[in-house]
Image (spheres, grey):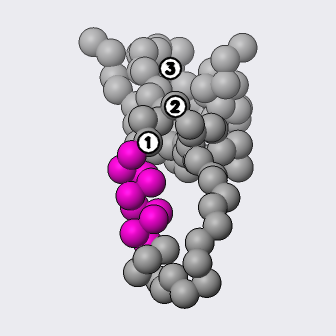
Amino acid sequence: MEIAQKVVEELKEGKTLSGQTKKVKIHLAALTRQTYTEEVEVPVEFNENDLDHIVYHTYDNTDGSEFVDDQEFWEKGQCYYEEEE
């Protein structure tokens, strides 16, 4: 049994219902993250602006192929239902 159908069955318990049904689609979205880490040696004199410049310049010059999935990050995206006609 699908997850949403299990929830429906739980909600039905103990209720008097007509027996009529309707179809709805449940839409779920999850936001995940990909990360890239590179260790780089910099002069000790570099300040926060210099380090920020390295970070943003590096990001602007990646094509995405260096990124890997972050298995720890998972946020709820837009979730909703839609009644079918």
Q: Which quarter of the figure is the C terminus placed in?
A: top left
Mark yes or no: residue 55 visible. Answer: yes
Residue type at mark 1 is Thr
Image coordinates of residue 8 in percent, x first then y, are: 61, 27
Mark 1 in CB contact with mark 2 (< 8 angstroms): yes
The prevailing secondary structure element of the residues shown in magenta is helix
Residue type at mark 2 is Ser
Distance Cα–Cα, label 1 vs label 3? 58 Å
The dot on residue 65 is 2
Q: Is residue 11 above or below residue 31?
A: above
Label located before the other in sequence (1 or 3) = 3
Image coordinates of residue 10 in percent, x first then y, are: 70, 32
Image coordinates of residue 62 in percent, x first then y, are: 44, 42
Distance Cα–Cα, label 1 vs label 2? 8 Å
Distance Cα–Cα, label 3 vs label 2? 54 Å
Residue linked to disc 3: 18
Residue type at mark 3 is Ser
Q: Which quarter of the figure is the N terminus placed in?
A: top right
